Amino acid sequence: MHKLLYLGLDARARSCVLAAMNATGRLLYTKAFTTSQAALISHVVAAPALKRRLVLEESALAAWIADAHKLCRLLRLGELTPVDHSDQGHRVDFKIAVQQYLAFRRNQASLKVQIKAKYHQAGGRVRSGYACVQ
């Protein structure tokens, strides 16, 4: 029985992988199981420790974390940072505004390319941002 285990959970739609690491950083085991509430609870409770610290990968944006072993290591070393899932309206509004601004910039760049292509088709040249039709 360990005093403390660091558990890393890589959860997917159909399966999960749970890794357990001791305080010195030694990987003790990894277990794969089907994704369900009962399976998750039974595997975490079965970890042979007085205390358990559990971290899980919660989104596809965390692709830099490759597997449950790395999650254990990051948790043990204190290298994880919390993710803000704020329901504050002004943050949501700001995010929407930024996304719209970025979409406008992409559209503008695409339109400029299309305009330059039309000038090329008409026999014009484009020099340092200015179109010259001959």
Image (cartoon, rainbow, N blue to C red):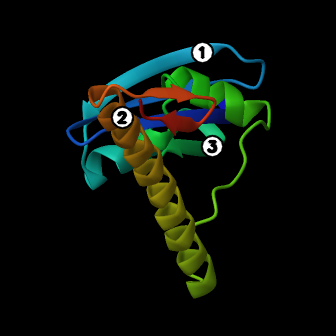
Callout in the foreground (3, 2): 2
Q: Which mark is residue 44?
A: none
- Residue 130, given in percent of the width and then of the height, sits at 57, 38
Checking the image for residue 119, the label placed there is 2
Three-letter amino acid code at the position of disc 3: Arg
| Residue 11 visible in this rendered orientation of the protein | no
Q: Is residue 77 above or below residue 12?
A: above
Residue designated by label 1: 27
Which element type, helix, strand or loop, lies under badge 2? Answer: helix
Question: Which residue bears the numbered disc 3?
Answer: 52
Q: Position of residue 126 (x, y in %)?
A: 50, 28
Quadrant the N terminus occupies: top right
Disc 1 crowd, CA 10 A, few/some/many (<14, 14-19, 20+)? some
Image coords of residue 39 (percent x, y): 28, 44
Q: Nearer the viewer, residue 124 or 56?
A: 124
Q: Residue at x 44, y 44 (%)?
A: 112
How far, Cα to Cα, is label 1 from label 3?
14 Å
Judge from the rendering whether residue 122 lies leftward or rightward of residue 103; answer left or right: left
Which residue lies most toward the bottom here?
89
